[in-house]
Structures are given as C-alpha cells and as structure tokens.
Amino acid sequence: MLYLPFNQNPLCSHLHWRCRDYGESMSVIRSSDIGNYLYCRRAWWYKKQGIESENQTELAFGTEIHRQHGRKVIASNLTRTLGLVLLFLAMILLVTYCTMQIL
C-alpha cells in the first residue's frame, strides 16, 4: 500500500500522512482525532497546533454538566433495576399467597 505525502494527496491533505517510500515517519491518527476533526475541523487544527481554547470556563462548565448527567443516568438505571427486583419479589409473594389460599 502506498501512502502519498500529505502535500501530494488531495484526498488526505488535512491529515498528516507521510510516505514510507520517502523515509518519513507516519503520524498516528487516533479515532478521537477523527471524531474531533469531523465535529469541528478548525478546533482539531488548533489542538494539533497546540493552541488552547479561550473559553476554558465554558468548557469546564460543560464538563461538569456532563458529569452530573452521567450520575443521573446511573441513578436512574439503579432505580429501575431496584423497581424490577421489587416487582419480581411482589409477584412471587402474590403467587405464594394465592397458592396458600387455594390449599
């Protein structure tokens, strides 16, 4: 498989491909890099250049909101599981009670 240098490949000009035939190293492209690029090309490029975002307060606030939401999802799942277990126990008790009334 031949990889063109990033400046000669029009399809991959935004990625840092290097050609092995030229003795250059290949850059590692992680799936998170692809996701960041697809979400916002400019933010991806700034990050690759080492430029920090100016809205650190908003980013920290968004991270905290996501953390709180994650906790709510976990609590919701635990509550649902507890409800299902209690429903199952109630059904067992009802069947036991009805069986005792018949016998």
Image (cartoon, grey):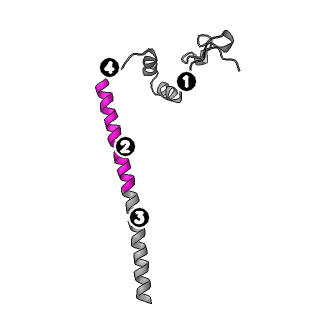
For label 4, the SS is loop
Res 47 → quadrant: top left
Residue placed under numbered mark 1 in the picture: 29
| Label 1, residues with CA under 10 Å away: few <14, some 14-19, many ≥20 | few
Residue kind at label 3, given as amino acid type: Val
Q: Earlier in the sequence, mark 2 or mark 4?
A: 4
Residue placed under numbered mark 2 in the picture: 70
How far apart are labels 1 and 2 at the CA level? 28 Å
Q: Is residue 44 left or right of residue 55?
A: right
The boundaries of the magenta stretch are 55-78
Q: Residue at x 39, y 16 (%)?
A: 51
Q: Earlier in the sequence, mark 4 or mark 3?
A: 4
Residue 73 magenta: yes
How far apart are labels 4 and 3 at the CA level? 49 Å
Image position, residue 72 (x, y; %): 34, 47
| Label 2, residues with CA under 10 Å away: few <14, some 14-19, many ≥20 | few
How far apart are labels 4 and 1 at the CA level? 25 Å
* In the foreground, 44 or 93: 93
